Image (cartoon, coloured by chain):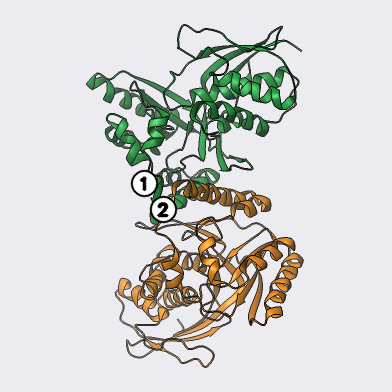
Chain colours: A green, B orange
Amino acid sequence: MSNSIKVFSPSTVANVGCGYDVLGFALDGIGEEMVVTELSDDKMVILENDKFDLPLKPDKNVASVAAQALLDAAGIKKGYSFAFDKQIHPGSGMGTSASSSAGAVFAVNELIGRPFNTHQLVEFAMEGERMLSGKAHADNVAPNLLGGFTLVRAYGPLDVLQLPTPDNMYVAIVHPQVVVKTTDAKRMLKQTVKLDQAVAQWGNVGGLVSGLYESDFGLIGRSMEDHIVEPVRKLLIPLYDEVKAKALEEGAIGCSIAGSGPSIFAFAEGKATAEKIKASMQAIYDEVGILAYTYLSKIGTEGVRVL
Amino acid sequence: MSNSIKVFSPSTVANVGCGYDVLGFALDGIGEEMVVTELSDDKMVILENDKFDLPLKPDKNVASVAAQALLDAAGIKKGYSFAFDKQIHPGSGMGTSASSSAGAVFAVNELIGRPFNTHQLVEFAMEGERMLSGKAHADNVAPNLLGGFTLVRAYGPLDVLQLPTPDNMYVAIVHPQVVVKTTDAKRMLKQTVKLDQAVAQWGNVGGLVSGLYESDFGLIGRSMEDHIVEPVRKLLIPLYDEVKAKALEEGAIGCSIAGSGPSIFAFAEGKATAEKIKASMQAIYDEVGILAYTYLSKIGTEGVRVL
């Protein structure tokens, strides 16, 4: 068994419109590469990265925290170094912390001979999320590890479902360079919702799940409607309504906020339509001089993998 | 074309645990027969029934109200008589009013040469529900007309989805003879819900829809959990917790309240298990001397049909 491994961990988008805190999907080939190497002692070491200012203390970095949770459960005392090469800037809403948590537990599990299955890895990766936000979310780490669309049906016990991915389904994403903190985005949400809005939302979640099984893009688009989270969180995203209207005009199946933002994603049938949408999103921010990165990807049906 | 028609309209169960106001399913062979006959003038006539005390005024009976909505939309001035033979006692929570609304619009549509499709019939049948409760619900009339499991994804515009029915899926139902008025059952529900409870509920709706597609009875059962409606409505149903616990002990996939109650339904894989559950539900009410009717049915994949 090698004492070093290189893995690719995809970026992910949580919520998917109506599915706040439960739905998510993985991108294809967009994410981060990690090199995880066994050390001679039982310390965790985060290798410095000149591109991004990542936490270097092992108890503050999601990768080492998640990996430690796995090692503790396995009763193994070992140390590892973690080196990251991220394509996506942290703070995008595209699950950059989750991809490190997921990549770390996947890599360490490989290095120690795979004692845990993928669903167990989700639980360990959630410990990275818990350290970061105080709550052990799974809506990003689940698609990270399983690939495709996932539904976190319940916590306690954790019940994560893999949903089908329609053929030829693409996503265009724009990441305007404004700072939205996950904690702020959470705080803005009211802790109670009207019953009729909640009913509309669970009608949509049911519709979206059905749409994925049926590969019915019209149904997927109609079902993405979100009356609870989007109206609040879009306030932090400049030109959100304009970007969404333009994406739909260019043929998007549906458009919403990636995770807690500020990235905006739009689904499209086929790569050509997704390209057009991506360009039109970019143009809106270019025109007003807001720096924005754009991405285009198929829905990624693979989770974290060895490179 | 005959000027009289006899139809069978199945009973239905709305909500299905987690899916308050959106999910429902039809029974197989349990419901009501209706005879609808064209009259020589444009009056509606409800024929008296010595078994049940149904409203005889055409503007107070759901069947004539729903049929009139259809005729108005078609621009046709005709009168019909409606005769009912119901197997289920009204006030059961098993959609007895919806089955009359749905049966009436289906029958009249047949008699005038089928100008409307099934989804349009749902909209007309909803007018019967509106007259009764003040709100044009579709969660019972949708499975009534379409059969199987249905999801009312949205109103305005109405978006009704048909979901798959797993093979060998049965339901046992007990109807304890206590009176629960739909209006009371609605009033008891709080008009706001906690966000985290709403999230848990839409996770379950997504899980239930996935479970139906996957024919995964374990997932269906886990997903039926309802933290919003059941805790309130079960207060009106004597021995609810005991009946549910017994049903699950006897092998039920899941158990919850039929519509707004007081009937309780339990899903089972296979007829033999459903029979055992039905008998055990009956025994609980027999023991304390509460009159209760029980029913056993496959999930009915057919909606209203001509006899």
Q: Name the residue at 67% across, 53% down.
A: B217
On what subunit does the disc labeled 2 rest?
A
Give the mark, 2 or 1, whose residue is nearer the N terminus.
Answer: 2
Q: Are marks 2 and 1 on the same chain?
A: yes
| Mark 2–mark 1 CB contact (< 8 Å) | yes
How many labels sit on residues? 2
Neighbour class for label 2 at 10 Å: few (<14), some, many (≥20)? many
Neighbour class for label 1 at 10 Å: few (<14), some, many (≥20)? some
Q: CA distance from mark 2 to mark 1?
A: 8 Å
Q: Is residue A293 above or below residue B104?
A: above
On what subunit does the disc labeled 1 rest?
A
Residue of label 1: A227
Determine which quarter of the picture holds residue B267: bottom right
User: Type of residue at label 1?
Assistant: His
Q: Name the residue at 39% across, 39% down.
A: A254
Mark 1 lies on a secondary structure that is loop
Determine which quarter of the picture holds residue A268: top left
The quarter in which the C terminus of chain B is drawn is: bottom right
User: Type of residue at label 2?
Assistant: Ala
Q: Is residue B130 left or right of residue B207?
A: left
Determine which quarter of the picture holds residue B113: bottom left
* In front of the other: B140 or A273: B140
Q: Is residue B32 above or below residue A1?
A: below
Q: Position of residue A12 (x, y in %)?
A: 50, 28
From this viewpoint, is residue A12 visible?
A: yes
Mark 2 lies on a secondary structure that is helix
Residue of label 2: A200
